[in-house]
Structures are given as C-alpha cells and as structure tokens.
Image: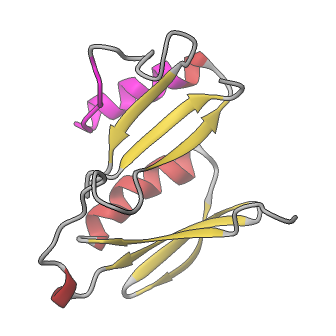
C-alpha cells in the first residue's frame, strides 16, 4: 500500500541487551516473529512491517543515543485495551524497566490518552497506546 511503513532500522549499543528487551515485547506482547537473525542484527516481522536492530560498530559507540538530539524520538505501538496497558505496565515494572512520567501514568499523553511510556536499554522511548486514542 502506498505510504505504509515498510521497516524501521535502529542501531544499538548492545545487541544482546536489545534482543532480550525487544524479543519479549515484540514476540510475546505483540505477536511479531523473528524474521532474520545474523551476528550483528535481528529483525522482527508483523504483517508487512518489520523492525530491525543492528549492533553499532565500535568506532561509532563514542556518542550514545539521546532521543532529545536530532533523530528518532520514540516508537509508538497500538494496543486494544486499557487492561493490556495495565498488564504491560506491571510486567515492565517487574522487569525493572524505567516507566516514564510515573506521576502522570497512564494519562501522560493527556486526560483522554491512555498509554504507557517506557525506555529500552539505549533509552529509546517506547509508547504503547490504546487504539483510537
């Protein structure tokens, strides 16, 4: 389809930590499947869209990722219910994942915007929001 997202590719500082974090989220919570895996990367597929994580080369690791710099700010995913957000939030906390804006959770996006915001191992912001919000 014209204009639909084909894929996103993200370079990461520690591929093993990234896989541990994203594999759980994408395969267990959102039904992605591992599409490809190689020494320096992995891709997760859902329908026609895939997300790729690649190990940053050593010579480029000097400057860590910061979502406030020019570039990717966050990835946002749909979900179907507030219960999904509540369950996911509990699981994220059990895993020690940093929940962003805890004082405003689950309305950090506004009073009618039910979502959870959190960070991956490189501090990439991830958002999961109830569809239709």
Taking the view exactly as shown, the residue that stands out farthest to the front is 70
Q: Is residue 63 left or right of residue 102?
A: left
Which residue lies most toward the left here?
62
Looking at the image, which is closer to me, 25 or 125? 125
In this view, which residue lies farthest toward the right? 1
In the displayed structure, would residue 8 be above or below residue 67?
Answer: below
Task: Identify the image quadrant of the C terminus.
Answer: top right
Q: Is residue 43 above or below residue 26?
A: below
Residue at the spot 54% in from the left edge and 72% down from the top edge: 43
Would residue 116 be found to the left or right of residue 93 on screen?
A: right
Front in this rendered view, residue 107 or 87: 107
Location of residue 78 with respect to 23 vertically, above or below: above
Report the side of 16 relative to 32 (left or right).
left
Across and down, in percent, residue 68 comes to: 28, 51
Q: Residue at x 50, y 25 (%)?
A: 115
Task: From the top left corner, tell me how far across and down residue 26 is, in percent.
Answer: 53, 52
Name the residue at 34% across, 37% down: 118
* Quadrant position of the N terminus in the picture: bottom right
Which of the 4 quarters of the picture holds residue 18? bottom left
* Residue 104 falls inside the magenta stretch: no
Stretch in magenta? 85-102
Q: Quadrant of residue 121?
A: bottom left
Query: Picture quarter containing residue 12?
Result: bottom left
Residue at left offset 53%, top offset 43% = 76
Q: Per the image, is 90 magenta?
A: yes
Image: 125 above or below 133:
below
How did the renderer colour the structure? Answer: secondary structure
Tag count in the figure? Answer: 0
Residue 101 in the image: state x and y as whole percent.
29, 24
Front-lying residue, 41 or 119: 119
């Amino acid at each position: 389809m014209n204009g639909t997202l084909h894929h996103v590719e993200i370079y990461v500082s520690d591929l093993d930590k990234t896989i541990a974090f994203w594999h759980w989220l994408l395969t267990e919570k959102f039904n992605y499947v591992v599409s490809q895996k190689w020494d320096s990367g992995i891709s997760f597929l859902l329908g026609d869209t895939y997300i790729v994580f690649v190990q940053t080369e050593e010579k480029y690791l000097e400057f860590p990722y910061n979502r406030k710099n020019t570039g990717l700010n966050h990835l946002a995913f749909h979900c179907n219910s507030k219960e999904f957000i509540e369950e996911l939030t509990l699981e994220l906390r059990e895993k020690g994942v940093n929940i962003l804006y805890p004082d405003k959770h689950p309305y950090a996006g506004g009073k009618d915007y039910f979502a959870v915001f959190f960070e991956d191992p490189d501090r990439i912001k991830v958002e999961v929001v109830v569809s239709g919000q």
